[in-house]
Amino acid sequence: MQIAQLLRRKGPEVATVAPDATVAAALGVLAERGIGALVVSGDGRTIDGIVTERDVVRALPERGAALLEDPVSTVMTAEVRTCVPTASVHDLARTMTDHRIRHVPVVEEGAMVGIVSIGDVVKARLDELEEERKQLVDYIQTA
């Protein structure tokens, strides 16, 4: 299965936050939407970084509660791994595992067209495996 197929089911919406938004504001959006990451983008199309709950938790011991008033750009991950819509779910799963990342923006012609989480990848792989299982059962029953 390609990422494009996954995005057709999931939808293209990408939650973003401006680089100068406060960490507190970003956490509010994460909580409100029930998600674990926001793409940091000044224009909603290009990627400046990504900020996750994990980024904030890792910065808290060093900077304390004052971190909440700092800009998101101070805690975001600036080097963001992306994929293209034609990438396979299987290859993306391997990339996510190898690099220990949970969210990957999907980019086409320099613009974001979606985002994929590890949960999306796991669900897609389970759906693929279930379909293969059904085909094997059908094959065995007709043989």
Image (tube, grey):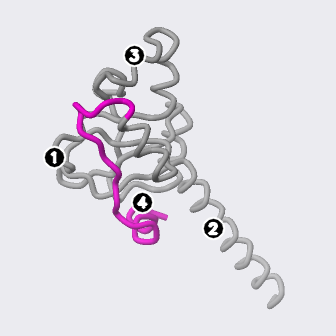
Residue with the mark numbered 2: 127
Q: Amino acid at mark 3?
A: Ala
Magenta span has 14? yes
Which one is earlier in the sequence, the residue at label 2 or at label 4? 4
Q: Does 13 sit above or below residue 80?
A: below
For label 3, the SS is helix
Give the residue at x 45% y 66%. 10
Q: Amino acid at mark 2?
A: Asp
Give the residue at x 46% y 17%. 65
Going by the image, does 124 lie left or right of 95?
right
Residue with the mark numbered 1: 43
Q: Nearer the viewer, mark 1 or mark 3?
A: 3
Q: Nearer the viewer, residue 121 or 32?
A: 32
Q: Does the CB distance between marks 1 and 4 fall below 8 Å?
A: no
For label 1, the SS is loop
Residue with the mark numbered 4: 3
Q: Which region is colored magenta?
A: 1-24
Q: Where residue 99 appears, x then y in whole percent? A: 49, 31
Residue with the mark numbered 3: 66
Q: Categorize mark 2 by other alpha carbons within 10 Å: few (<14), some (14-19), many (20+).
A: few
Q: Where residue 71 appears, x then y in whole percent? A: 28, 26
